[in-house]
Image (spheres, rainbow, N blue to C red):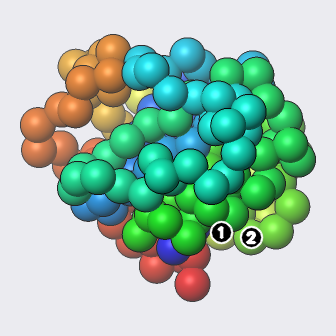
Amino acid sequence: MVINLWIPADPVLAAIAPLGLGAVAGTALVVDADPDGPRYPGEGSLAALVAAGPRRSDLSPTHAGMAVLRNGGVELDEAADVLAALAAGWPSLVVRHASSEPPAGHSVAVVADLPGALARRVNGPTVIQRCARASSSMNGDVQLPRPSTRLVRSLLEGRMPGPSRWIRAWKPVWGMAE
């Protein structure tokens, strides 16, 4: 199952949202489709897989859990064959998009519930991230509780946090991919 996760406006949310979705899946790969995306910890990159070709043996999971593949500077259209091979090899694939417009095909948007004119409204399947000063006027298919500072720090440092209400709240998003 593949979910294209589109996070248009918030760089911190754009970095952690795919990790939350991947963490709740069990065995999942999070792939950054944004050449200017965050430098997630780890050795591999999408650019390195593109350079090696999509027939490499490391396109399938070797153990349960979440793996993260940073971008490494490759454009999405250059990586299409590798992404198709990854989708065939992994039970759950999260593709992170941080552009200002939704990606082609089916995608799920993640937006912060900001007050008033700051709120970003999108069409289609939507995950709403509650904020400290949430407007509570936004509707989405899934509404996430505020993540703790400790959780955000753990995810950004490449460490899997312990049990989390925020991560569990991502579970219904996998049903949106069907």
- Disc marking residue 125: 1
Q: Tell me the SS state at disc 2.
A: loop
Q: Earlier in the sequence, mark 1 or mark 2?
A: 2
Query: Looking at the picture, how far across and down is residue 130, in whole percent?
Result: 45, 42
For image coordinates 41% across by 69% down, the residue present is 91
The circle on residue 43 is: none
Above or below — where is 10 with respect to 94? Answer: above
Name the residue tied to disc 2.
106
Amino acid identity at mark 2: His
Amino acid identity at mark 1 = Pro
Please indicate, yes or no, whether residue 136 appears anywhere in the rendered image.
no
- Circle 2 residues within 10 Å: few <14, some 14–19, many ≥20: some
- Between marks 1 and 2, how big is the CA–CA gap? 9 Å
Residue 158 appears left or right of 43: left
Q: Residue at x 74, y 70 (%)?
A: 106
Residue 70 visible in the current orientation? yes
Point out residue 126 in the picture as x, y percentages from the top left corner: 62, 61
Instruction: Identify the image quadrant of the C terminus.
Output: bottom right
Question: Does residue 18 appear to the left or right of 46 in the view shown?
Answer: left
Q: Residue at x 33, y 15 (%)?
A: 157
Image vertical order of residue 144 relative to residue 48, above or below: below
- What element does badge 1 sit on? loop
Mark 1 in CB contact with mark 2 (< 8 angstroms)? yes
